[in-house]
Image: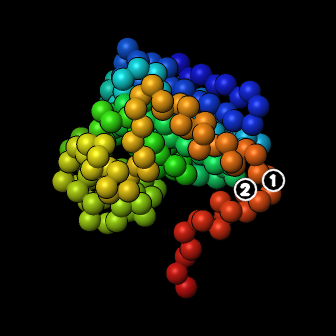
């Protein structure tokens, strides 16, 4: 249910469980984390999904059995954030729940016009994964983060773009080509230069 194509310098990781809205089981999350942990040599990595939904978050049955509070979510988002190459989330549809973490950890986020964004963790009686609120607040600010996490708002693609939650809206038939285009300059550059620029763009801690 997780597909990997790593021909050349661009790795493409695809969540392929469209009949279940690409909801994530523990086994799928472990596989995703292992792929990300092995992707240190990738010049660029594109994360996407099959079907009309990027991911609905945790598989409901497994969420009730403990997946909602598993450390595997943090392992996955941390592995993505640690990658030295350019990471791009190509969102083929709606992004919900715990799946938000892996996308927030990417460098760039592009989405189709029909994508929606929500994270109803509080309503379900859980805390968000520890790093997710901070990463979201870095992108869109504390108030808008609370709008999503505490106000329970579902954000449409155009509002997500205005907030800075995503970087660009792309028509579905052009989504993957556009992701490849965004990766092209990084792949063509000297690896040390590309990695150094990414490091220079990281948020600086205040002294």
> Is residue 96 toward the left or the right of residue 86 in the image?
left
Residue 38 place in picture, x, y as percent:
72, 38
Q: Is residue 112 above or below residue 148?
A: above
Nearer to us in this view, 183 or 140: 183
Image: 156 above or below 50: below
Q: Say which quadrant the C terminus sits in.
A: bottom right
Residue at point 32%, 49% (across, down): 160
Please state which of residues 112 and 72 is positioned toward the viewer in this rendering: 112
Image side of residue 90 versus residue 140, left or right: right
Q: Which residue is at the front of the view, 35 or 111?
A: 111
Which residue occupies 39% across, 42% down? 169
Left or right for 132, reference 123? right
Q: Secondary structure at mark 2?
A: helix
**Viewer-side residue, 116 vs 23:** 116
Q: Residue at x 76, y 46 (%)?
A: 188
Q: Position of residue 3 (x, y in %)?
A: 59, 22
**Above/below status of 107 relative to 196:** above
Whether residue 68 appears in this view of the structure is no
Tell me residue 129's x, y (percent): 41, 50
Q: How far apart, in angstroms, are the residues tagged by discs 1 and 2?
A: 6 Å
* SS at badge 1: loop
Q: Are marks 1 and 2 in contact (CB under 8 Å)?
A: yes
Instruction: Work out which residue is located at the far top of the displayed protein and give it.
Output: 19
Q: Residues within 10 Å of mark 2 (few under 14, many from 20)?
A: some
- How far across and how far down the image is residue 144, in percent? 27, 60
| Residue tagged 1 | 190
Color theme of the render: rainbow
Q: Residue at x 59, y 44 (%)?
A: 182
- Number of other residues with Cα within 10 Å of mark 1, as a class: few under 14, some 14 to 19, many 20 or more: few
Tell me, yes or no, if residue 97 can be seen here. yes
Question: Is 9 on the left or on the right of 33, as rendered?
Answer: right
Q: Which mark is residue 194?
A: 2
């Amino acid at each position: 249910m997780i597909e990997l194509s790593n021909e050349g310098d661009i790795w493409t990781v695809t969540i392929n469980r469209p009949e279940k809205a690409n909801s994530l089981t523990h086994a799928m999350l472990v596989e995703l984390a292992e792929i990300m942990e092995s992707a240190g040599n990738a010049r660029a990595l594109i994360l996407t999904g099959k079907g009309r939904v990027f991911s609905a978050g945790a598989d409901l049955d497994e969420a009730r059995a403990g997946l909602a509070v598993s450390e595997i979510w943090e392992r996955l988002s941390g592995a993505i954030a640690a990658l030295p190459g350019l990471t791009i989330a190509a969102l083929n549809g709606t992004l919900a729940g715990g799946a938000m973490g892996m996308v927030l950890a990417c460098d760039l986020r592009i989405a189709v016009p029909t994508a929606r964004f929500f994270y109803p963790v509080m309503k379900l009686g859980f805390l968000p994964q520890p790093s997710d609120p901070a990463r979201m607040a870095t992108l869109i600010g504390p108030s808008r983060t609370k709008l999503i996490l505490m106000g329970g708002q579902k954000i449409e693609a155009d509002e997500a773009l205005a907030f800075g939650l995503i970087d660009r809206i792309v028509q579905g038939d052009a989504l993957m080509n556009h992701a490849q285009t965004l990766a092209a300059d990084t792949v063509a550059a000297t690896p040390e230069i590309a990695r150094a620029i990414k490091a220079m763009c990281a948020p600086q801690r205040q002294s």
